[in-house]
Image (tube, rainbow, N blue to C red):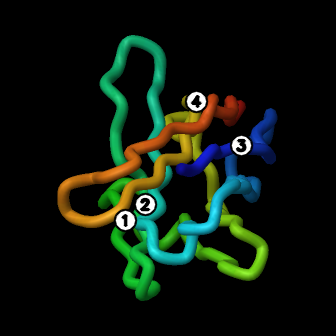
């Protein structure tokens, strides 16, 4: 099983940068697909970025070219580097992990608030 703890959120001005971290417990981190989701007030949770166990990445169109997801399997940590932040990036960001196409061990972190001021 896995437990996830996010950190790195905060308040930043538009155009600024933040790096979110998600530290995972457990021994299967390296074979899990890791994801960052976000949920803004009164909006549905959306997938922002994904990185597979093999290192393949996918991004929402709205963040392509601005956000970068990466993982350090030695540290059991996944990162989301966010640059050129916009007010519309304001949301609670959640780390998610699962194993395989059937999403075994589907696990969520508690979320971290990111607020971008204009």
Q: Which residue is mark 1?
A: 59
Query: Is tag 3's residue or tag 1's residue first in the polypeptide sequence?
Result: 3
83 left or right, relative to 1: right
SS category of the residue bearing label 2: strand
User: Could you say which disc has been placed on residue 49 in the image?
Assistant: 2
Q: Are marks 1 and 2 in contact (CB under 8 Å)?
A: yes
Q: Residue at the spot x=62%, y=51% of the render?
A: 85
Q: CA distance from mark 3 to mark 2?
A: 17 Å
Q: Are marks 4 and 2 in contact (CB under 8 Å)?
A: no
Up-down relation of residue 3 to residue 101 (above or below) = above
Q: Which residue is mark 3?
A: 5
Q: Which residue is mark 4?
A: 92
Q: Residues within 10 Å of mark 2 (few under 14, many from 20)?
A: many
Query: Is tag 1's residue or tag 4's residue first in the polypeptide sequence?
Result: 1
Q: CA distance from mark 1 to mark 2?
A: 4 Å
Q: CA distance from mark 4 to mark 2?
A: 14 Å
């Amino acid at each position: 099983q896995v437990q996830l703890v996010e950190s790195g959120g905060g308040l930043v001005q538009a155009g600024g940068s933040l790096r979110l971290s998600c530290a995972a417990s457990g021994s299967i981190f390296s074979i899990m697909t890791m994801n960052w989701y976000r949920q803004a007030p009164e909006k549905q949770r959306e997938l922002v970025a994904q990185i597979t166990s093999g290192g393949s990445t996918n991004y929402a169109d709205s963040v392509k070219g601005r956000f970068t997801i990466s993982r350090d399997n030695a540290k059991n940590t996944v990162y989301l580097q966010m640059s050129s932040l916009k007010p519309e990036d304001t949301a609670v960001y959640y780390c998610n992990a699962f194993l395989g196409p059937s999403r075994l061990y589907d696990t969520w972190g508690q979320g971290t608030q990111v607020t971008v001021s204009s």
